[in-house]
Image: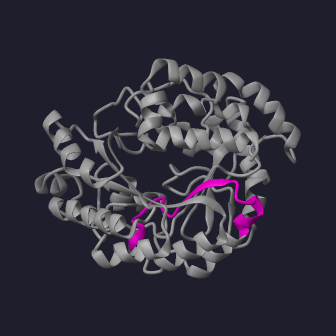
Amino acid sequence: MTVQNVITRVGYWVIKSRLGQALFRRNPVGRYIVRRFGNLARALPLSAPQNVMIDICNACNFRCTFCPTGDNDLLKSVGRPKGLMDFALFTKIIDDLKIFNGQITYISLHKDGEPLLNKKIGEMIAYAKAAKVASSIEVTSNASLLTHEMATLLLDAGLDTIRVSVEHVSDQGYKNLVRTYSKYQQIVDNVANLYSERNRRKHKLRILVKILDVGLSGEEKEKFRRDFNPISDVARVENIMGWSHSEKKDFTLGLNPSVGMDGVTPLKKERIVCPEPFKMLAINFNGSVSPCCDDWAHGLLVGNATTTPVGDIWNGRELSRVRQLHLSGRRGELPTCASCQYMQGVTDIFDLDDQRLALLRKYEALSIEPAETPAA
């Protein structure tokens, strides 16, 4: 395993695990150690993406007020298409990822929508697992469709991790926030059933449950922990976040957070470089490729996996141009990135600002041509 693999996998562990949070994210000494010795800048440039998001369905059965996908008028205004990923395209993408020789830490079958709406999800998980292209295959779901039959399907397919997004802790809270669903106890029961079946089988599936702090009271946060700590491996409250194109809508619902999603990292509003294009790929349902998961409008595309090998996109001209524009302090030339709020709260391990000029020289040396114009 290379040094870059070690650094990126440690970073993943710090972010995802309960112990990692305790030792590093919420501990000043641990945070200094991560910043000094384990940061992403030391590993760049990566020969493979740390994680790949494959959006197998960009529609959703919820219409959450804090999510771009929940605002149909907003999606129409930017012309974002809607659909399910074809199984043939999915297998082509997975086959393409074999070029990275298993260096990918995790693949998430999710980006803009609810993946359980894709009836091929079991076959997709099984195909990705059999290909051994990543250490972990993951899904993020609102759990409304996580029936006993669906739980069985996911376990049979070999899913490694499921991240459940709980939206509120009462029926009325769901009704106000989600607008299309109001059965909180059903969410609890669905997760409890998956947890029980996982344990009965002695399956290795990890169950992570999160809820966004959308102005929750202390009592509501405690209820969330009380309901989900016994039926999950990790249950945590996350801060609400902004998205790209924050000029189009206030996705923070007027809460104006001062820290990132981890609830610890102070927002760095003057941040120059977003780390996402340097460590991940987000493949949309139709094969178009975005440099990060926050490109909800599909406005910053760096290639298309239907016609181009994913490895060529990762090392290609368009993504290189995006990276160089960030490193040279010209992020504002990319409309998708210019007013992005999400990047302000990324954790310390991924901060690239201090090393951006040295990194720029590295990427210019690798580049086909200097970055003179923003990516399409």
Q: Residue at x 18, y 55 (%)?
A: 174
Q: How is the image coloured?
A: one colour
Say whether residue 106 is magenta. yes
Image location (x, y in percent) of residue 3: 74, 39
Q: Quadrant of residue 248?
A: top left
Image location (x, y in percent) of residue 237: 31, 40
Q: Is residue 169 left or right of residue 53?
A: left
Image location (x, y in percent) of residue 203: 43, 66
Q: Residue at x 50, y 25 (%)?
A: 268
Q: Is residue 191 visible?
A: yes
Image location (x, y in percent) of residue 304: 68, 66
Q: Nearer the viewer, residue 305 or 40?
A: 40
142 vs 22: above or below: below
Q: Residue at x 33, y 68 (%)?
A: 200
Q: Residue at x 44, y 61 (%)?
A: 205
Read off the magenta span. 96-116
Q: Nearer the viewer, residue 374 or 276?
A: 276
Q: Is residue 104 left or right of residue 361?
A: left
Q: How many marks?
A: 0
331 vs 51: above or below: above
Q: Is residue 79 visible?
A: no
